[in-house]
């Protein structure tokens, strides 16, 4: 099992629960930080001292405060660390469950496992640690479909057009008329409805308005 692990997490309760889970696995040296920059500096210093960390467990998102950060998110931190320390294993432990985000992170090659926080989150994290230690990868069942058929989960110009129409306050019948006028197919009501529902699944959105908000967050519209 890993002997030296870094936890990058800004929520104290979650950080403590992760620490406890690592201790239960018999991991002897566990460091904690609430800033990605601190994690990078401490991991780099440990490597220079000949006592490298073997595993990083990081959230994706960190709350902003008064302190400027060079590495503002867990995936950016992981990418920077992998360039310098390719042997360092990295597990993302997060609430982020949007398929597009999961896929973009996992196919980058910087992340070894993706575990989702939740009711069974710590059990999944323990399993992820074991899998990564064995040289395997791991993705939580809730988001495993993100690595499935590309055509099923990736968005295209047709999808962006629909989301932009939703963002403009258009109803589904109005979107159908717009698509027909622009010569964009398919434009039937059933086709538009099915694609909106599919996009909600991809983005893990609860409503069309939530879908639009998530798409805006990603800079798609």
Image: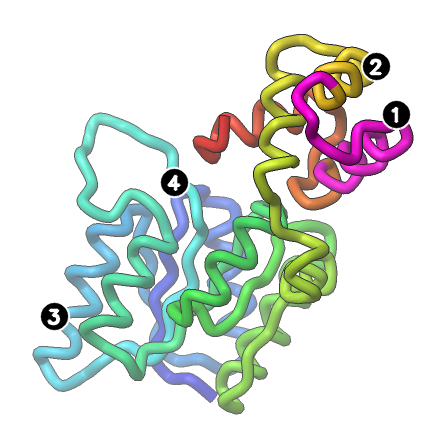
**In the rendering, which numbered label is found on residue 62?**
4
Taking the spot 28% from the left edge, 51% from the top edge, the residue there is 36
Report crowding for label 3: few under 14, some 14 to 19, many 20 or more residues within 10 A (C-alpha).
some
Who comes first in sequence, dot 3 or dot 4?
3
Image quadrant assignment for residue 209: top right
Residue named by callout 3: 45
Label 2, secondary structure: give it: helix
The quarter of the displayed image where residue 201 is located: top right
Residue 173 tag number = 2
Image point (86%, 28%), residue name = 188
In this view of the protein, which residue sits in the foreground, 20 or 177?
177
Question: In terms of secondary structure, what is the magenta stretch mainly?
Answer: helix
- Residue 92 position in % (x across, y down): 48, 60
- CA separation, marks 1 and 2? 6 Å
Does dot 1 land on a helix, a strand or a loop?
A: helix
Q: Confirm whether the magenta stretch covers residue 198.
A: yes
Q: Earlier in the sequence, mark 1 or mark 3?
A: 3
Q: Position of residue 176 (x, y in %)?
A: 79, 20
Callouts 1 and 2 close, C-beta under 8 Å: yes
Outermost residue to the top: 169
Query: Which stretch appears magenta?
Result: 181-199
Q: Residues within 10 Å of mark 2 (few under 14, many from 20)?
A: some
Magenta highlight on residue 220: no
Task: Residue under label 1, please give it.
Answer: 189
Residue placed farthest to the left in the image? 48
Query: Mark 3 and 4 residues: CB-CB less than 8 Å, in contact?
Result: no
Q: Earlier in the sequence, mark 1 or mark 4?
A: 4
């Amino acid at each position: 099992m890993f002997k030296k692990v870094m936890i990058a997490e800004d929520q104290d309760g979650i950080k403590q629960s992760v620490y406890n889970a690592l201790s239960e696995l018999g991991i002897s040296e566990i460091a904690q930080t609430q800033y990605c920059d601190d994690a990078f500096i401490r991991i780099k210093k440990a490597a220079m001292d000949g006592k490298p960390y073997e595993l990083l467990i990081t959230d994706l998102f960190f709350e902003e405060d008064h302190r400027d950060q060079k590495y503002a998110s867990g995936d950016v931190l992981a990418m920077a660390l992998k360039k310098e320390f390719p042997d360092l294993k990295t597990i993302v432990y997060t609430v982020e469950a949007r398929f597009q985000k999961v896929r973009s992170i996992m196919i980058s090659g910087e992340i070894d496992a993706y575990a989702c926080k939740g009711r069974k989150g710590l059990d999944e994290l323990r399993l992820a640690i074991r899998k990564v230690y064995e040289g395997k990868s791991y993705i939580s069942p809730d988001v495993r479909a993100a690595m499935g058929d590309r055509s099923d989960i990736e968005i295209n110009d047709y999808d962006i057009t629909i989301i932009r129409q939703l963002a403009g306050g258009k109803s589904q019948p109005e979107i159908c008329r717009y698509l027909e006028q622009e010569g964009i197919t398919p434009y039937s009501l059933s086709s538009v409805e099915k694609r909106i529902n599919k996009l909600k699944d991809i983005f893990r959105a609860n409503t069309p308005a939530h879908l639009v908000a998530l798409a805006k967050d990603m800079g798609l519209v």
